Amino acid sequence: MSLTQLWWQFIQIGVAAFGGLGVTLSLIERYLVKDRAVLTAQTVTESLTYTKFLPGSTGVQVVGYLGYRLGGWPGAALATSAFLLPAFFLILVLSILYEEITFLLGETATPALRGLTAAVAGILVATIYRLAKPRITTLTGGVVAVTACALGVVLQINPAWIVLAAGILGVLMPQRFAQEQSTSAKESKAGDQERKR
């Protein structure tokens, strides 16, 4: 497969890859494993295995890895840029439309946009609460969470440093997290048994 063909295949995948990693893998399988037979299903599976634990978008990483397998470093660069190009242009067009609409509506749009911003912030807080509630079951965990929030908001410390420090704290004091967590787990089981009666 030439680099031009590789670029075109990943443009096509990027145009149709709405819906996340599952859709991306399905398109890769259809275009590159079944239709063109330039990759095997095992290679696609390996790409997912190798990239799953890296930070960032797994779909983009899989595309970069497969581009590398098909065309070396130039293939990785072309596949990744081709895959991202359709989304880049779509967000560019939507941004321009957003600016035009808010300009045309003027002050009428401002309260609506403030309301949308407040709603999005509220949804993020609710999501964080739902994610944190079953996982922060100890006093120590709660203190770490509140401290991490304060360090991020007040002192504006880089989140990577906060996460690293919390991980080190967990390694140094595992009993503080485990003992209280097991007590919480026992209470949760007792509550479930009472509800069944």
Image (cartoon, grey):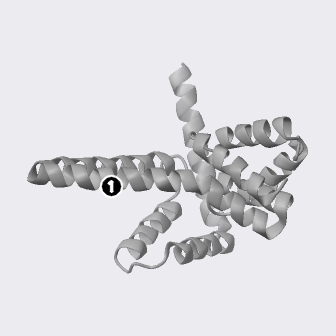
On screen, residue 93 above or below 189: below
Amino acid at dot 1: Ile
On screen, residue 37 above or below 62: above
User: What residue is at 46 percent from the left and 70 percent from the top?
Assistant: 148
Query: Looking at the picture, how far across and down is residue 107, in whole percent?
Result: 9, 53
User: What residue is at 45 percent from the left and 79 percent from the top?
Assistant: 157
Query: Looking at the picture, how far across and down is residue 156, in whole percent?
Result: 40, 78
Q: Name the residue tied to disc 1.
A: 96
User: What residue is at 77 percent from the left and 39 percent from the top?
Assistant: 31
User: In the visual, does 106 lie left or right of 169?
Assistant: left
In the displayed orientation, state which residue is furthest to the top.
197
On screen, residue 160 above or below 129: below
Query: Looking at the picture, how far across and down is residue 144, in whole percent?
Result: 49, 67
On screen, residue 19 above or below 73: above
- Is residue 42 something that shows in the picture? yes
User: In the visual, does 105 lie left or right of 6?
Assistant: left
User: In the visual, does 143 lie left or right of 28?
Assistant: left
Where residue 13 sits, quadrant-wise, is top right
Other-residue count near label 1 (Cα within 10 Å), few / some / many at <14 / 14–19 / ≥20: few
